[in-house]
Image (tube, grey):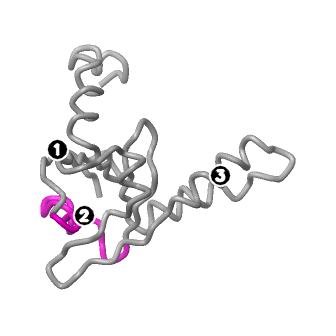
Amino acid sequence: MQFCGTVSHQLDGKNRIRIPKKFRKDLGDEYYFVAGSQGCIGVYPKAALEERLEALKSIRASEPQKLLAKRKIESSVEEVNEDDQGRTLLPQPLRAHAGIEKDVVTIGMGDYLEIWSKEAFDKLNASISVDEAYELVGF
């Protein structure tokens, strides 16, 4: 699976979203929200999340900063439950983390998705040109 692209959409009046159709099929039946870096919400298929969580298992109590980071990440994981119409509640702590009030952007990031407030995404996206992005990652 390879998630790519961008879809703009909105929360409904009950703070629910639908994962955009172009991404939904590849997420599978079990997927998770996780507080993401730089103010987004990560959306991980079960296998991709398990792979990342496995990497955190090696962190020990003798590494207090890493243990704190592990706690921060793992405590933010929320299993997604859709209603009969394919909507899911975007939990308040994750909405607050991402500054999401109404307009959202969902973007593909390879093996996972990111959900952003439209304002935050537009600001972050404007901070780098396409040419700079290509050069930075050697694409």
Identify the amino acid type marked 3: Lys
- Secondary structure of residue under mark 1: strand
Extreme residue toward the bottom, this view: 84
Q: Nearer the viewer, mark 1 or mark 2?
A: 2
Q: Which residue is mark 2?
A: 15
Residue in view at x 58 percent, y 59 percent: 74
Q: Which residue is mark 3?
A: 70
Residue 68 at what x, y percent from top left? 70, 47
Q: Which residues are magenta?
A: 13-30
Q: Which residue is mark 1?
A: 6
- Secondary structure of residue under mark 3: helix
**Side of 114 relative to 104 (left or right):** right
Identify the amino acid type marked 1: Thr
Q: How far is the residue under mark 1 from the one under mark 2?
A: 20 Å
Residue 17 at what x, y percent from top left? 21, 63
For the C terminus, which image quadrant? top left
Above-or-below relation of 106 to 128: below
Residue 20 is inside the magenta segment: yes
Residue in view at x 14 percent, y 48 percent: 7
Above-or-below relation of 101 to 124: below
